[in-house]
Amino acid sequence: MLDRIAEFFIFGLVPLVVGVLAVPEFTSAAEKTIAGEVTYRERIALPPNAVLSVELADISLAGAPATLLGQRKIVLAGQVPIKFEIGFDPKAIQPGRAYALQARITVDDRLIFLADTRHQVDPLDGKPQTIVLKKVTS
């Protein structure tokens, strides 16, 4: 019985684990990132359950919903500025199209801060972006 168990580990499980670990991860190699920081001007402390959402979208089609290319949600542990990085497929970026970053901070799904202007970007240029949010009046 012990011989069969040892045989299983040596000839069955070990090659399987080694094979899985040896497979390269193609998605991360093909992925590009856009990075930056989000801030706001008000001197207000954020509660510990605040969430920052930043999205990269294709906004080329007027009157149509934006096409989401990447997003990042961050549960906030500190204050502004808040650093972000969004992964996206560079093959999705087409010449002549318009791309923008959209950002907002929510607390318990209630909107607190919002980017109220279009933050148009070139996702492939590698420049860090700064998005300034405005407080939403309730």
Image: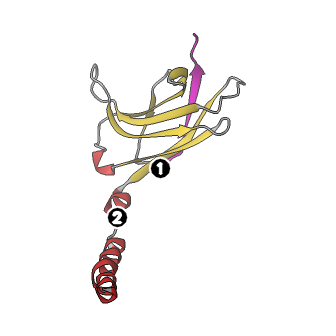
Give the image location of residue 2, x and y in percent: 34, 87
Drawn side of residue 136 relative to residue 102, left or right: right
Colour scheme shown:
secondary structure
Q: Earlier in the sequence, mark 1 or mark 2?
A: 2
Residue at the spot 50% in from the left edge and 20% down from the top edge: 116
Most foreground residue, 132 or 84: 84
Residue 64 percent across, percent down from the top left? 27, 22
Residue on which the image places disc 2? 25
Query: Which span is picked out in magenta?
Result: 126-138
Q: Residue furthest top?
A: 138
* Dot 2: element: loop
76 vs 7: above or below: above
Q: Badge 2 local density, few (<14 within 10 Å), some, or many (20+)?
A: few
Q: Looking at the picture, which amino acid does disc 1 mark?
A: Gly
Crowding near the residue tagged with mark 1, few <14, some 14–19, many ≥20 C-alpha atoms within 10 Å: few
Is label 1 in contact with label 2 (beta carbons under 8 Å)? no
Looking at the rendering, which quadrant does residue 22 occupy? bottom left
